[in-house]
Image (cartoon, grey):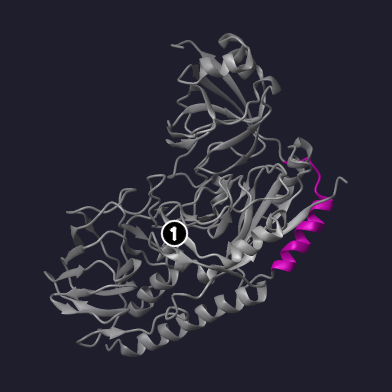
Amino acid sequence: MIEILSSGALNSVQDRGRRGLLSSGVSRSGAMDLPALDAANALLGNEPNAAAVEVATFPFRLRFVVVATVAVTGATAEARLAGRRLMPWGAAEARPGDELTIDPPTAGARIYVAFGGGVDVPQLLGGRATDLKSGYGGHEGRGLKRGDRLPLGRRATGRLPDGGIGALPPPGRSDPDRPLRVLPAAEWLDFSDAARQRFLSVGWRVTAEADRQGCRLDGPELVRERRRELLSHGIVPGTVQVPPSGRPIVQLAEANTCGGYPKIATVIEADLWRLGQAMPGDALRFAVVDRAEALAALRETADWLDRLRSAAALYRVS
Amino acid sequence: MANEFTLSDAGTGALLFDVAQDGVFDETRQARLLALADSLAGTPGIDDVVPGMNNLMVAFDPLTVDADEIGRRLAEGWRRAASAGEPGRSHEIAVVYGGPDLQDFAAGLGLSVDEVIERHSQALYRVAAIGAMPGFPYLSGLDPKLATPRRAVPRQGVPKGAVIVGGGQAGIMPITAPSGWHILGHTDFQLFDPHRAVPATLRPGDSVRFIGKGGER
């Protein structure tokens, strides 16, 4: 059990999100930065879909009621456990009464706090993710607030070394200026050459309208040359829609499951975490890749996670 | 012509299969698509089969399933898909007509409020797809006389239970959320229950009739 001491409505219990329910209108939801959640669970020897706390409002504080292991990953921020600094992308043992404090990030937007055994809220629709838009899942279907107590599952055997352990962040985190890789989507060719050129050459500004549903970008207008009528269709996180304003919106974890706006491109799965870590005012660029490169990037992340899981297991002494 | 389609990538792990022609929704094609969707559901590696309006999105695990293989299955399945799927269920949904848009909506069409109510409640609707919001039904079958462009500025909070129309479609709000559709009334019909294995009450292929209940206008 842990007790939340200080939080904001945007901090919520998240896992890897729901599958198989898009056709019921149920968004995937889940962590906005999946590799960060995966890393936190790997450090603790948790099952891959264990639920953690996604922190987007700072400072965040909690108190351990029981002995537990804790991992903190994601945005760059100072995290202290019982006054001692945790390593970046690190994990450590906590004792009852210990407080965990996380300061506002100096880079990035979201931190993942995972616990050995995961946050054991009831499963709903096959998962533990909170859907803040629809108000179900996670802890009572809402963001966390002061006084909330969250149960923890059964932790993996073994004890973390004193001083904790740390992980190497996933591939691609060291270069914040690298473009977001996209695959062309259904209406790619409906946009003029100039519009496509602009889409790929401009630094798009993340606006204040950026949340778990989507990220609205600001920049020059993208004109669709071929204005054919579109009927509503299923969409996935990463879809870059161009509404009548001509400014793109990237749909994210809690996006509506169907939409009707033209889609110029889709951000590849391996790069979606960057939108989860984007802050209003950040500049983003896009670059087109092919399916082979998109798959290679996803494999690279999967391999990194496998290595991290094996390495972390070596550090847990029984 | 009948077997034409377009296939496009929807990112690394999804494909969009589109059989719409000239942006006009077609019931026969939709029935065939729903049969195609049923035939793909449960395939290992496929996470989601999502019927839209004359299109189908298939989401899969790209590390275990080849997108080209799914594309081939969609193309072949579409050629074979017949519209005789399982018959849908019928639902009668009680509506109290009224709300903030009804008067203006009727006036904009040159109809009386009673005529709007009559046309809306006499049609037999078909659930074309479920999506956007949890359990939201895209209903086809709206009287063409009631087809109106969506509001220029969407309303921020259209309440749960609002009975709405937008363009040539009808629907019901499952949660309170922004929408550009016009509100014609209200129902207590429950569209979604997250505690059920199949959380959406309505299913594609079901038919719906709205029954006007007395009440305030």
The residue that appears at 38% across and 67% down in the rendered structure is A50
Give the residues drawn in magenta, as a range: B67-85
Q: Residue at x 39, y 76 (%)?
A: A39
Q: Nearer the viewer, residue A106 or A93?
A: A106
Q: Quadrant of residue A96?
A: bottom left
Nearer to us in this view, B49 or A106: A106
User: Which chain letter matches label 1?
Assistant: A
**Residue B46 image position (x, y, % from top left):** 63, 62
Q: How many marks?
A: 1
Left or right relative to B214: residue B85: right
Which residue is the site of mark 1?
A: A206
Kindly tell me whether residue A139 is visible in this rendering: yes
Q: Quadrant of residue A48?
A: bottom left
Q: Is residue B9 visible?
A: no
**Residue B11 at what x, y percent from top left?**
61, 63
Q: Residue B9 appears at what percent x and percent y?
A: 67, 62
Q: What's under tag 1, amino acid-wise? A: Val
Relative to B32, residue A46 above or below: below
- Left or right: B98 as drawn, with respect to A41: right
Secondary structure mostly seen in the magenta stretch: helix
Q: Residues within 10 Å of mark 1 (few under 14, many from 20)?
A: many
Q: Secondary structure at mark 1?
A: strand
Q: Position of residue A189 (x, y in %)?
A: 72, 57
